[in-house]
Image: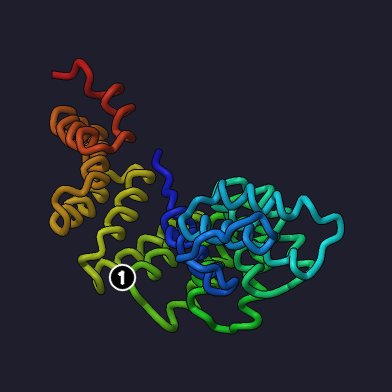
Amino acid sequence: MLKLNVANSMMSYHRHARCAVALIMITMMGIPLITFAQPGKTREALVIEADTLIGREDYAGALKIFSRILGKSRDRTTEDYPLIYKRAYCYYALNEFDSALTDINSYIKMVPDEQARLLRAYINQELEDYDAQLEDLNAFIVANPGNPELLRWRASVYIESERYRDARNDLAQLMAFNRGPELHAYFGLTYYYLDDPDSAMMIFDEVIESNPDYIQSYIYASSISLEQEASDLALQYIEQGLNVETGNLTLLFYKGIALVEKEKIEEGCRCLTKAFEGGLDDATDYLKNYCYGAN
C-alpha cells in the first residue's frame, strides 16, 4: 500500500547545493564579488561585467555576455577555457542542464581538473544520469579514499539508482566512522528495498532503542508495518513516535490509515483530517475514499 521514498531526502544538501558550488567556483576561478564594469566593450571589460553578474546571481545576464565573447572566437584558446567553465555554471544555475553538460565536457577535455568534474557530477545528478555521476564520484573516491562525504554522496546515488547492495556497502563503511541514527536507519532501508522487511524492522528497532528521539525510525517502521497489513504493530510505532513529536503529520496520516483499516472510521478520519489540514496532501485520497459522507 505504502512505499517509502527516501532517495531525495538523503542527500538534500547535494540536491540543493548550487550556492555551495557557486561559492567554490567563485573562489577557484577568481570571480570578483564587488566590481564594476570598465568603460568600453573590450574583452576584459565584458569578462569583468559577466563575473559581477554572477556574483549578483544574475546568471542569465552573465550567460549572454559569455556567449557573446565565445561567439567571436572560431578557434578556442587558453583564454576561452575559464569562460566555458563559467558559462557551464550559468547554464546549470538556470536549469539548462543539457547545455551545461555540453560546455563542461568541452572544458574537461581541455582542463581535466577536479573542480570541473565536481560541477559535472552535479549536472549529471540533475539529469539523473547515474552512471556518469558515479564515474566522477568513483574517481574522487579513488583520489580521496575513505572520505565520508564522498561515500555518503555515492550511497545516495546508489539509492536513487536502486543499487541497494552497493548503497549498503557504502553505508556500512560510513557507520564505521559515525553510527548515527540517520545512517543506521538508511542502512535498514536498504534491506527494505531488497525485499527483506524483517531485517529492516530489526534495524529500526535498534535505532529506536539507541536513539529514541529520532523520529524517522518510527515513520519507517510504521510505514513498513502498514505495507505488511500489520495495523496493530503500526499503531505501536505510531504512538511511540507521537510521544516524541506530537504533531508529526506523517505519523498522524499513518495513524488515520491504521485506524481506518481497523474499521475505526470516525477516529481514523479525524487523524486524516488533521494531517490534511496540516498540509499533507497524501491524505486526500483516503479522505475521499473513507471519510466523505462518513458519520
Q: Nearer the viewer, residue 233 or 135?
A: 135
Q: Is residue 13 left or right of residue 212?
A: right
Q: Nearer the viewer, residue 263 or 282?
A: 282
Residue drawn at 37 percent across, 65 percent down = 185
Residue drawn at 49 percent across, 78 percent down = 148
Q: Amino acid at mark 1?
A: Glu
| Quarter assignment of residue 84 | bottom right
| Picture coordinates of residue 73, whole percent (x, y) | 81, 56
Q: Which class describes the residues within 10 Å of circle 1: few (<14), some (14-19), or many (20+)? A: some
Q: Quadrant of the C terminus?
A: top left
Residue at the limit of the structure toward the front, as seen here: 39
**Relative to 176, residue 97 above or below:** above
Helix, strand, or loop for circle 1? Answer: helix
**Relative to 93, residue 217 above or below:** below
| Quarter assignment of residue 87 | bottom right
| Quarter assignment of residue 289 | top left
Q: Is residue 98 left or right of residue 72?
A: left
Q: Is residue 191 visible?
A: no
Q: Nearer the viewer, residue 228 or 81?
A: 81
Q: Quadrant of the N terminus?
A: top left
Residue drawn at 22 percent across, 23 percent down = 291
Q: Nearer the viewer, residue 53 or 224?
A: 53
Residue at the limit of the structure toward the top, as seen here: 293
| Picture coordinates of residue 225, whole percent (x, y) | 33, 49
Q: Is residue 52 left or right of residue 115?
A: left
| Picture coordinates of residue 40, whole percent (x, y) | 63, 56
**Relative to 32, residue 56 above or below:** above
Q: Is residue 100 visible?
A: yes
| Picture coordinates of residue 139, whole percent (x, y) | 67, 75
Residue drawn at 43 percent across, 62 percent down = 13
The residue that mark 1 highlights is: 206
